Amino acid sequence: MNQLQSLESYSFYLTVIAYFLAMMVYWIRMGSKNKAVGKVAAVLAVIGWAGNTITLITRTMLAHRLPLSNGYEFILTFCWATVLILLYYEFRFKLKALGAFVMPVPFLLLAFIVMTMGANERIIHAIPPALKSYWLTFHVITAIFSYGGFAVSFGLAIMYLIKTQTGTNPNVGIVARFPEAEVLDELCYKVIIFAFSFLTLVIITGAIWANYAWGTYWSWDPKETWSLITWFIYAGYLHARLMYDWKGKRAAWLAVFGLAAVLFTFFGVNYLLPGLHSYA
């Protein structure tokens, strides 16, 4: 048991260090012409993701359940999904600069754990009866892929805004290494479709779980309310895009604002508006 606890701790800090170094090297690559720097950044991100995976596996072995039951575990899985989706898009679409705008998200999330969560908050406790449901598993798994996708769409939106900034020559400097603005806009749209589909499942599975745990499908708990607000933000993005061909800067800013709503749904609700989800 002690060996597993040590392994979880070592792999967690490996993840933090690797994500930090990956973020820094991605930033360095923005101003470097050396292609090897980009490969180093990607390798560091992969190492961090591997450490993240080991942390989750050891946590599962220690808890005898999937690590999906408290804030510490959700942040770990959120980071895991974010970096997985980032690496997919980086390698699939050759987006070498994307990591510079996405990696700060998982690093800052893990830094939040290091700075605010003591040993008592990270220790494994018996889970409340309300969490003993397979619907919780489905609910949280859909949430991590939804949130991870929105984090990647945020990075793409920031790249688009930089690429199209007034007075910026798209063929000079770091922006010359970005894909064309239209490509970034389209990729951001596709990622949001992916993440929005999972967010819809988050709300559906959450309602079913709520009925199992508390006898009602919807109680207007702060977490439920803000999840619905986030859903409407991204639904508005997709509706405006499909019905009114709403592209460009307005759509990019909405994607940025959407991630702010996602983060508030987790951090703001949990720490400022406690409710039935205060343990999540």
Image (spheres, helix red, strand yellow):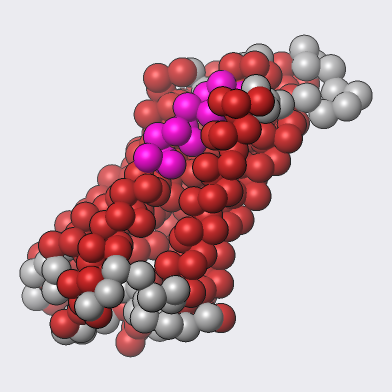
Q: Which residue occupies 67% across, 35% down?
A: 252
Q: Which residue occupies 41% across, 22% down?
A: 91
Image quadrant assignment for residue 188: top right
Image quadrant assignment for residue 172: top right
Residue 13 x, y percent position in the rendering = 37, 62
Is residue 186 visible to the viewer in this orientation of the structure?
Answer: yes
Image quadrant assignment for residue 243: top right
Q: Which residue occupies 33% across, 87% down?
A: 120
Nearest the camera: 217 or 176? 217
**Magenta residue check for 191:** yes
Q: Residue furthest right?
A: 167
**Residue 173 vertical position relative to residue 198 in the rendered view, above or below:** above
Q: Is residue 212 left or right of residue 81?
A: left
Residue 171 x, y percent position in the rendering = 77, 12
Task: Point out the image quarter for the C terminus.
Answer: bottom left
Label tally: 0
Examine the residues drawn in magenta and state their main secondary structure.
helix
**Magenta residue check for 215:** no
Q: Which residue occupies 61% across, 56% down?
A: 260
Is residue 111 visible to the viewer in this orientation of the structure?
Answer: no
Nearest the camera: 78 or 209? 209
The residue stretch that appears in magenta:
185-197
**Residue 135 vertical position relative to residue 193 in the rendered view, above or below:** below
**Residue 13 vertical position relative to residue 145 in the rendered view, above or below:** below
Q: Residue furthest bottom?
A: 120
Residue 108 x, y percent position in the rendering = 54, 59
**Residue 80 vertical position relative to residue 266 in the rendered view, above or below:** above
Q: Is residue 33 left or right of residue 116?
A: right
Task: Point out the image quarter for the N terminus.
Answer: bottom left
Residue 72 x, y percent position in the rendering = 36, 70
